[in-house]
Structures are given as C-alpha cells and as structure tokens.
Amino acid sequence: MRVIPIPARAGITGFESPAAEYTQLGLSLDELLIEHPSSTFLAFAEGDSMQDVGIFDGDLLIVDRHETVRNGDVIVASLNREFICKIIDIPRRLLLSSNPQHQPVIIHEYDEFSIEGVITRSIRCHRKSPLLSEK
C-alpha cells in the first residue's frame, strides 16, 4: 500500500488535490500497525467502558501477546472465562474502566485470571468491511 500523507481537518469543505504535492511512503498497514505478527491477534471491543481512552463499541483491537504488560496498559484479559478489555493496575490488583460509570474490578486470589495481551492499537471502522464477520 502506498500512503499519501494528506492532512484533512474536520470541518473543512474540501482540500487541495493530492497530486499538488504528491509523496509516497513505501509501507504496509501490517508494518505500521503490527510489530509482532506471530504474537498478535484481533478482537472487537464491546460496550462503553473504555470510551475515555478512545476505544468504542465495535472498534477493532490489535492485541500483542509479545509485549510485556506494564502498569496502566490497556489489556485484554480472561477473568473467570470472560474476555475483558481494561486498564491494568498491577500494584492494587485492579482492572479499571476509563468510563467513570463503571466500577473497578478487583482481581481476587480465587479468580481465574490471565492476561491475553496488550492492546497496542485500536481501529474505528466507519464503514463495515465485508472481510470482517458480523458481530
């Protein structure tokens, strides 16, 4: 894929022709978005609990299992056999939402808990792709 870097500001009615200052960058979306292909999977976000960090219902999440989890990372985890997307607070053993309407979740010793990966990117599709299955 060739990228033509054109700044497009919201609220404008048009922009200069891309051919006016034509520049191409030789990169692919895979190279741009995925650092560890063999350790990366995609997931769909559900709900509104992460909207204040820019993750909305239906967004495509790029989850990297190779990344070392750091305090404050947005992660995908399995908590009692349910996949969740939350911010990890390691010292306090909490899973946090970015939406203040959702309470923190305590990770208890008796919980089945595993971190599935770190969310490195999220993508909002404004038009559904026929390649992506329906939710």
Image (cartoon, rainbow, N blue to C red):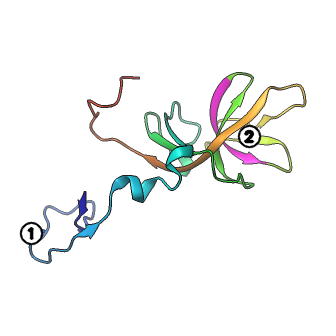
The secondary element bearing badge 2 is classed as strand
Is residue 100 visible from the viewing direction of this image? no
Furthest residue to the bottom?
21
Range shown magenta: 82-89
Label 2 crowd (10 A; few <14 / some 14-19 / many >=20): many
Q: Residue 65 at what x, y percent from top left?
A: 62, 45
Residue 117 placement, left or right of 131: right
**CB atoms at circles 1 and 2 under 8 Å apart?**
no
Main secondary structure along the magenta-highlighted residues? strand
Is residue 50 visible from the viewing direction of this image? yes
The secondary element bearing badge 1 is classed as loop
How many labels sit on residues? 2
User: Real-space Cα distance between discs 1 and 2?
Assistant: 47 Å
Above or below 2: residue 21: below
Above or below 33: residue 84: above
| Residue plotted at (61% across, 42% down) | 99
Which amino acid type is shown beneath numbered disc 1?
Answer: Ser
Q: Residue 121 at what x, y percent from top left?
A: 49, 51
- Kindly identify which residue carries mark 2: 95
| Residue plotted at (82% across, 35% down) | 106
**Front-lying residue, 10 or 122:** 122
Query: What label does residue 17 carry, if any?
Result: 1
